[in-house]
Amino acid sequence: MISIKELVLGSKGVVGLDIGSSLVKLVEIEDSSQGSVLKTYAELPVQQGVIDNGVAKDSPALTEHIKTIFKNSKCGAKNIATALSGHSVIIKKANFAHMNDAELRELLTDEAENYMPFDDVREINFDFHIIGENELNPNQMDVIIVAAKKDVIEDWVAAINRTGRKVVVVDVDSFALETAYEQNYDFVGEDIVALLNIGASITNINIVKGGQSVFTRNFLLGGNAVTEAIQQKLNISFEEAEEIKCKGGNGGGISKLDLITYAEPIFSEIERSIDFFSSTFMDPYIKHVLVSGGCARLPGIVEALANRLNAEVELFNPFKNIICDKKHFSEQYLASIAPIATLCVGLALRRVDDK
């Protein structure tokens, strides 16, 4: 997996902390001789305006939210894995002549402006992942480059570190989805699967081939668009509209079909992204689509996406290969949190000695 922050020394275990514009989620997963075990899950609503497009706009308020979720969950772990998202991070695929990691890092450092939309490489942290040989040109290799401004990373990390914890992994949300996928799903050879995470304000797309990312895209549209459509339709507050959406449209004259209709702009962007992938990659058939995020709770979303994408679509189950004590986590409860827990499970599976 890609990390855009150098890992620091400490205990190998981490707590996944997924900070979204509507919820903070916390997941703690322990390693055991039987496998990965879910120890803690917690979530906490985020006040509007604290997080905007993946950037912390009110850092002190974010710190207080994080303190509260740790207190409520009684989680005593200190090492944190978190993720950047939205316009705060740039993900780009590029082709290079074959070279080793050290040579590629030196090239990117010297010629950063040719591959990343930043004027000064000293202002950014970047990392890369070599996918492998380019399918069209065996003399070149495909590489995914990830970059973010240092000040954005520092603000994000500082808000967490002020709670007395230590950020040891800064991941990217799209790749945290991939980690959750690798843990929970079997893939054969060159299977192509699309991982979708439709959050409140950001949708992440990560298309993996043979278990390895080959295409990513984030766009600033998510479940809030559905809430705003309800708000406008009924002339009510955002909070009231959100409650109606969370109840599946029960109340206020909003039907389940209305909810799917209001989500059409999101579906269109997903379809455009997958069409672009299909038009630019050899053997582009997508076998399966896994959907997560708060918007995945909308009634009928699986069927609607299956019709739009002409593919097998199902809800992402991040607990499929995670051991969960049924005394503490009932099957009904796990099913209810699965869509919003997926990204955070991917973060919780990271370890400080990952490469």
Image (cartoon, rainbow, N blue to C red):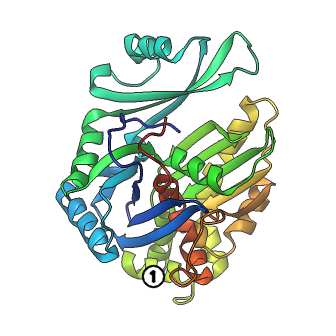
The reply, left or right, for residue 11 in relation to residue 178 is left
Q: Is residue 112 visible?
A: yes
Relative placement, left or right, of 88 versus 137 is left
Give the residue at x 57% y 76%. Answer: 334
Image coords of residue 119 (percent x, y): 32, 20
**Total numbered circles:** 1
Identify the secondary structure beneath mark 1: helix
Residue 96: quadrant of the picture: top right
Residue occupying image coordinates x 43% and y 46% = 86
Question: What residue did someone put label 1 on?
Answer: 243
Nearer-the-camera pick, 78 or 56: 78
Question: Looking at the picture, which amino acid does disc 1 mark?
Answer: Glu
Coordinates of residue 294 in the picture (x, y in percent): 52, 67
Out of 313 and 330, give the one closest to the viewer. Answer: 330
Q: Residue at x 46, y 65 (%)?
A: 224
Q: Based on the displayed image, in which of its 4 quarters is residue 51 positioned?
A: bottom left
